[in-house]
Image (spheres, rainbow, N blue to C red):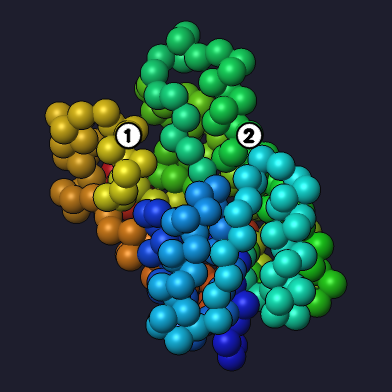
C-alpha cells in the first residue's frame, strides 16, 4: 500500500501516540484524534516534522456527530480511508463489582464500547463503499478472562471483541478486514492509574511470563503489521501481545 490514509482515535498518549509515530515512519498520511486540543495539535506538528501529512481533529468518541465528522473530514482531506485504529479507551473505576454503579458502568462503556461501535459504524460506511480497508480495535488480555476488581473494564473489552468479530463478518466479502489487538500490561499512564500503586503494579508484572510490561512501541508494531498487506488474509482475530500471559 502506498502512503495509506490512517485514522487513529485516542492518539495523544500511550499506545495511540506510539502507533501514530510508527505509521508516520511508514510514510502514512495521518489523522489523529483525542479530546485535548493542545496535545493534539502538538502531535500533528510532530508528525508533520517527520515529513508526513497529518491533521488533528478534536473528537469525543461517545458522541456520534463528532465521530461522523471525524471520518468525513478524513475523507474530505485525503479522499479515502485505508486504516482505522480505534484506540480511545478508559480504565474506568477499578474496584469490587459490588461497588460499581450505573454511573461507573456508563463512564466505562460509553467510551470503550459505544465509542468503538460508533467508530466502526462510520469507518465501515466508507470502507465498504470503497471495497477495501483495515480496522484494528484495541482490546486487552483481560477481554478474554475474568479479573477480580476490574469487572466493568473486563466486560467492556469482552464487548469490543464481540464487535470486532461481528464487524469482520460484515466486512469480509467487501475486502474490509477487522481485527483487534489485545495487549497485556503495557507501560503507560493508564496502567499506573489502573494498578494505583507500585506494589500492585509489581504484582501484576510478576504474573507476566516475560517478567516485564510491554512497551507501547511493541503494540504499535503489531498494529502496523495487522494493517498492512502482509496480513491480508487475517480478519476477525483477537491478537494477543502479552509476554506469554495467555499461555499460562
- In the rendered image, residue 243, in percent from the top left (x then y), is placed at 27, 54
Query: Quarter holding the N terminus?
Result: bottom right
> In the image shown, does 169 or 138 lie closer to the viewer?
138
Name, please, the residue furthest toward the top. 98
Can residue 1 be seen by looking at this rendering? yes
> In the image shown, does 29 or 36 lie closer to the viewer?
36
> In the image shown, does 136 or 119 lie closer to the viewer?
119
Q: Earlier in the sequence, mark 2 or mark 1?
A: 2
Q: Residues within 10 Å of mark 1 (few under 14, many from 20)?
A: some
User: Residue at image x 69%, y 70%?
Assistant: 74
User: Residue at image x 55%, y 75%?
Assistant: 54
Give the label on residue 103, or none.
none
Which residue bears the numbered disc 1?
193
- In the rendered image, residue 19, in percent from the top left (x then y), is placed at 43, 66
Q: In which quarter of the image is residue 15?
A: bottom left
Q: Looking at the image, is 126 positioned above or below residue 132?
A: above
- In the rendered image, residue 177, in percent from the top left (x then y), is placed at 66, 68
User: Residue at image x 33%, y 64%?
Assistant: 218
Q: Quadrant of residue 214?
A: bottom left
Q: Is label 1 in a helix, a strand or a loop?
A: helix
Which residue bears the numbered disc 2?
110
Q: Is label 2 in a helix, a strand or a loop?
A: helix
Image check: 40 left or right of 69?
left
User: Residue at image x 61%, y 60%?
Assistant: 57
Q: How crowded is mark 2: few (under 14 residues within 10 Å), some or many (20 or more)?
A: some
Image check: 110 left or right of 142?
right
Query: Quarter holding the C terminus?
Result: top left
Amino acid at each position: 500500500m502506498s502512503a495509506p490514509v490512517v485514522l487513529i482515535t485516542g492518539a495523544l498518549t500511550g499506545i495511540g501516540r506510539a502507533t501514530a509515530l510508527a505509521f508516520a515512519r511508514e510514510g502514512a498520511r495521518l489523522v489523529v484524534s483525542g479530546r485535548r486540543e493542545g496535545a493534539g495539535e502538538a502531535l500533528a506538528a510532530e508528525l508533520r516534522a517527520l515529513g508526513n501529512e497529518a491533521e488533528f481533529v478534536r473528537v469525543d468518541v461517545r458522541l456520534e456527530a463528532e465521530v461522523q465528522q471525524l471520518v468525513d473530514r478524513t475523507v474530505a482531506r485525503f479522499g479515502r480511508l485505508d486504516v482505522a485504529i480505534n484506540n480511545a479507551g478508559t480504565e474506568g473505576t477499578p474496584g469490587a463489582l459490588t461497588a460499581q454503579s450505573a454511573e461507573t458502568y456508563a463512564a466505562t462503556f460509553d467510551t470503550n464500547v459505544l465509542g468503538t461501535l460508533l467508530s466502526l459504524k462510520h469507518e465501515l460506511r466508507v470502507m465498504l463503499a470503497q471495497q477495501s480497508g483495515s480496522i484494528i480495535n484495541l482490546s486487552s488480555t483481560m477481554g478474554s478472562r475474568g479479573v477480580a476488581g476490574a469487572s466493568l473494564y473486563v466486560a467492556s473489552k469482552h464487548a469490543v471483541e464481540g464487535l470486532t468479530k461481528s464487524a469482520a463478518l460484515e466486512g469480509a466479502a467487501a475486502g474490509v478486514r477487522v481485527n483487534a489487538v489485545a495487549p497485556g500490561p503495557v507501560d503507560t499512564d493508564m496502567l499506573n492509574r489502573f494498578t494505583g500503586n507500585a506494589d500492585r503494579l509489581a504484582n501484576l508484572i510478576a504474573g507476566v511470563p516475560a517478567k516485564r510490561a510491554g512497551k507501547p512501541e511493541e503494540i504499535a508494531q503489531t498494529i502496523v503489521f495487522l494493517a498492512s498487506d502482509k496480513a491480508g488474509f487475517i480478519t476477525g482475530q483477537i491478537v494477543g501481545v502479552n509476554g506469554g500471559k495467555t499461555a499460562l
